[in-house]
Image (tube, grey):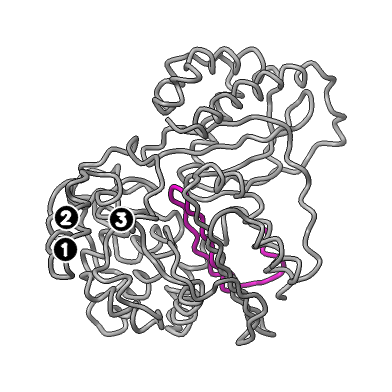
């Protein structure tokens, strides 16, 4: 267990205990009730909703409830019995709770909760690929974000984020912020834009259709994020529905279904046509199941991958694809992007694939891209927002293409660090800076 993980568990104990003082305070006036925000239906959002349901339930929570959802390493530091006791004695008396702020990715999020008693507090949550809680921090509300007053200030604050940061902000064809925008960086789920582009091209050429049915096989199952991995074998989904789930809730198994249907070579061709500066970085193009296997599976498989040429790597990926996933979600705890287990492109490459998707002028594509405007992000007054973000251990990414009758803008932020905790801690600032960039680009 890393020092960061030990500290996470320790802070959980201290912060939750501190809430005892809050729950003894007098209720807030009724006319001062805060406005609520919606929790997205992402994997971490669903786990956040589960926790709120426990906080507000009529009956006490039990250790068994928490033991089923807490990561094993977390429980070694904070046993399920202790979490249940603190929840019952120190948190539930302040119910009901209103969620007044939320931002996050598929696997990490921070929500601000206002209870019927005491002061509001932040609940910071991270889950593994199996949906188990690896981080749960409850503490004082983070200082109010002071919005940036200029794009120069946005750039300055982006440079203060931890790890390797790449950023590109464009108004139309004019670049207004560029931080290592041509440097190759891990994308996490932003890579799914290339799969969507390949799907659109296959439909446009008549080689596929949005209404075509895909059938789930046991070998297609990946780890979350998503929902399709839990469906029974033989489940049927249309190409349209798979593409929607891939972008809207970043469904990994839906993504892999599309890659299988298209063939990785077609996705690689879409990467090249999108304007990627180095298509070889995504050749051969791996599925999510294959990345989980290479990054967190059998070390011998990873060694074989590192030693192989392109033909050998294709053969290895085909072997992984033909077998059920052999990696458990609990194993996905450390960063592996630095070892090549991710999809790589620059911020400029991501902006290019967004433009390529817009240029398809396919109503299905444009609609799918705008179904999720950015994990609770305030995108200002832009009427059309295309978004895809992503997160993996030590990686946080976000990309937006926005437009109105007067013009368009593109915002791409990529952050990576081998210090997983540092990336998690910077998540709120990351998304606030995206909001600032979108607002100031209008």
- Position of residue 229 relative to residue 378, above or below, is above
Q: Quadrant of residue 373?
A: bottom right
Which span is picked out in magenta?
A: 378-401
Residue 308 bears which disc, if any? 1
Total labels drawn: 3
**Badge 1 or badge 3: first in the primary sequence:** 3
> Residue 205: horizontal and vertical position, in percent?
27, 85
Q: Nearer the viewer, mark 2 or mark 3?
A: 2
Q: Is mark 2 on a helix, strand or loop?
A: helix
| Measured Cα–Cα span from mark 1 to mark 2 | 6 Å
At 39% from the left and 55% from the top, the residue drawn is 338
Q: Nearer the viewer, mark 1 or mark 3?
A: 1
Instruction: Please say whether residue 196 is one of the residues in the magenta stretch.
Output: no
Q: Is mark 3 on a helix, strand or loop?
A: helix
Main SS of the magenta part reads strand
Instruction: Please say whether residue 395 is one of the residues in the magenta stretch.
Output: yes
Quadrant holding the C terminus: bottom right
Q: Are discs 1 and 2 less than 8 Å apart at CB?
A: yes
Mark 2 neighbour density, 10 Å: few (under 14) some (14–19) many (20 or more): some
Quadrant holding the N terminus: top left
Residue 288 bears which disc, if any? 3
Residue marked by disc 2: 304
> Residue 100: horizontal and vertical position, in percent?
71, 42
């Amino acid at each position: 267990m890393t020092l960061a993980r030990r500290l996470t568990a320790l802070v959980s104990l201290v912060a939750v205990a501190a809430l005892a003082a809050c729950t003894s305070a007098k209720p807030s006036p009724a006319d001062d009730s805060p406005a609520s925000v919606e929790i997205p239906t992402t994997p971490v959002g669903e786990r956040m909703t589960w926790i709120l349901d426990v906080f507000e339930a009529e009956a006490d929570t039990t250790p068994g409830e928490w033991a089923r959802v807490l990561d094993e390493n977390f429980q070694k530091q904070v046993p399920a019995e202790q979490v249940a006791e603190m929840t019952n004695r120190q948190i539930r008396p302040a119910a009901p709770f209103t969620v007044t702020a939320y931002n996050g990715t598929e696997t990490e999020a921070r929500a601000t909760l206002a209870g019927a008693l005491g002061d509001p507090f932040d609940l910071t949550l991270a889950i593994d690929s199996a949906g188990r809680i690896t981080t749960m921090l409850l503490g004082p509300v983070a200082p109010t974000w002071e919005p940036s007053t200029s794009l120069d200030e946005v750039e300055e604050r982006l440079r203060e984020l931890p790890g390797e940061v790449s950023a590109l902000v464009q108004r139309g064809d004019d670049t207004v912020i560029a931080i290592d925008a041509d440097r190759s960086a891990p994308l996490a789920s932003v890579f799914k834009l290339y799969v969507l582009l390949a799907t659109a091209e296959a439909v446009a050429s008549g080689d596929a259709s949005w209404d075509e049915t895909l059938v789930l096989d046991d070998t297609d199952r990946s780890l979350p994020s998503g929902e399709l991995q839990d469906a029974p074998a033989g489940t049927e989904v249309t190409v349209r529905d798979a593409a929607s789930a891939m972008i809207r809730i970043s469904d990994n198994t839906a993504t892999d279904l599309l890659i299988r249907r298209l063939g990785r070579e077609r996705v690689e061709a879409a990467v090249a046509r999108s304007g990627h500066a180095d298509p070889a970085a995504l050749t051969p193009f791996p599925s999510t199941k294959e990345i989980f296997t290479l990054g967190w599976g059998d070390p011998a498989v990873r060694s074989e991958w590192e030693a192989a040429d392109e033909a050998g790597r294709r053969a290895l990926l085909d072997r992984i694809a033909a077998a059920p996933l052999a990696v458990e979600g609990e194993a996905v705890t450390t960063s592996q992007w630095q070892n090549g287990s991710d999809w790589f492109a620059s911020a400029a490459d991501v902006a290019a694939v967004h433009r390529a998707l817009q240029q398809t002028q396919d109503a299905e594509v444009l609609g799918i891209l705008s179904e999720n405007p950015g994990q609770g992000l305030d995108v200002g007054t832009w009427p059309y927002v295309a978004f895809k973000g992503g997160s993996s251990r030590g990686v946080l990414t976000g990309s937006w293409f926005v437009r109105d009758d007067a013009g368009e803008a593109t915002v791409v932020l990529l952050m990576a660090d081998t210090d997983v905790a540092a990336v998690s801690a910077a998540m709120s600032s990351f998304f606030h800076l995206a909001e600032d960039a979108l607002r100031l680009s209008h």
